[in-house]
Image (tube, helix red, strand yellow):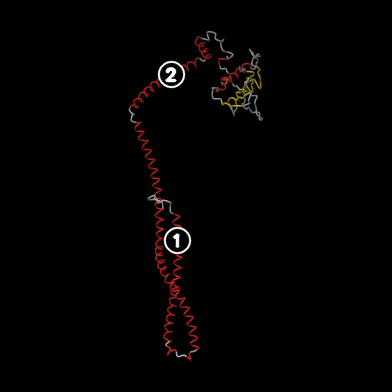
Amino acid sequence: MNKINSLTLSNIQSHKKSIFKFHPGINSIIGPSDNGKSVALRALRWIIENKSPGVPFLSHWEKNEKGVLTGKGFAQLSTDTHKIKRKRSTEFNGYMVMNNETGKKDKYEAIRAGVPDDLVKLFNMSDVNTQWQLDPPFMQPPAWTPGKVAEFFNKIVKLESIDKAFKSIAAKKKQNKTNISMASQQLTEAEESLENLNWLPRLERKIDKLEKAEQDLASATAEASVMRELADEYRALRGSIVKKYNPLIELEGKIEALEANTADLKVVVEAKEGLSTSMDEFLLLRKRVTAQQPYIDLDSAGLIPKLEKVMARLNNVQEQKKVLKQSVDSYNKVYKEVTEAGEDIKELEAQLPETCPTCGSKL
């Protein structure tokens, strides 16, 4: 049980700073008149009920350095668990609470005559626990009528709260009954509506088929897009191959012609070698003849016409030699072009896919 251990008053009427210490059981405050006994009760009710007395409450004890009244004062209850201070000043008007065990401090602004619920639980007291000095004898007629006595007991047992609770329970019971009735009606309507929706399972199956068809369509569309891209690449590669291959066909024709000319060239080269030998012999012979010319009559011997024919053949051989040299150079040039074209074709073949994107056959 949380007991009140002391009451402290500061700058309240006749009390500059007073501390009332209480003991278990009955406590009495005794003293001459006008010495502040009633003030202690007023201060206690100020804390418990948050009701300021109708007389000037704060006193003249609190002054600042200029001697001006500060208007500050407080009343504090100390219990087993907390210190509860009701303070009033120009800066703050409300409650200050400290937990004795943890040292935690909380502030509560005073709102008119109301007391915060947290503090009501700490006090465990109300106006039924106090009585003013000039109040009539407790529960004695004629001041205490039967109605007033009943009202007092109602406060003690909190009958008003019980009535409110019963009224709230009855209202909620009625509301729940109405909600149950409405819910039952809605359930019946929902069941009827559900019976009218017996076509939904068929619709769900159709929707599943439609979703699968949409997935298949999306997959086919993606595959078609890939095929179009492969086809575009194939056409581009094919165009490049054709562009490279046409000159190759022309080169193949030239190669065939060159190969035929090469055979003729071999014959001519052999003839040239024979003619070269004959030419060397002829020149040697001519040199010898020239040396013996004073002694030989070339015309009588019929050698001049023969020599002229030989010289003509030699000149013809020289011309053929030039032509053959040009043919050999042309052949080498064409052979180089063919080799380069073959390398280009190999690069294009390396870029081709393993299978044809249009027919699927292996390339």
Give whichever of discs 2 and 1 has the lower sequence position.
2
Q: Quadrant of residue 73?
A: top right
Does 53 sit left or right of 310 as displayed? Answer: right
Mark count: 2
Q: Please, what is the three-letter code of the amino acid marked with disc 1?
A: Gly
Where in the figure is residue 254, as x and y percent of width and height? Answer: 40, 67
Q: Quadrant of residue 12?
A: top right
Where in the figure is residue 311, as x and y percent of width and height? Answer: 44, 82
Residue 218 higher or lower than 239, as above or below:
above
At x 43%, y 18%, the residue is 173
Q: Nearer the viewer, residue 160 or 62?
A: 160
Q: Which residue is mark 1?
A: 342
Residue lying farthest to the top in this orientation: 141
Q: CA distance from mark 2 to mark 1?
A: 99 Å
Q: Secondary structure at mark 1?
A: helix
Q: Which mark is residue 173?
A: 2
In the rendered view of the protein, which quadrant contains the N terminus?
top right
Residue lying farthest to the front in this orientation: 301
Q: Please, what is the three-letter code of the amino acid marked with disc 2?
A: Lys
At x 40%, y 21%, the residue is 180
Where in the figure is residue 76, as x and y percent of width and height? Answer: 62, 22
Does 74 sit left or right of 292 as displayed? Answer: right
Residue 131 higher or lower than 336, as above or below:
above
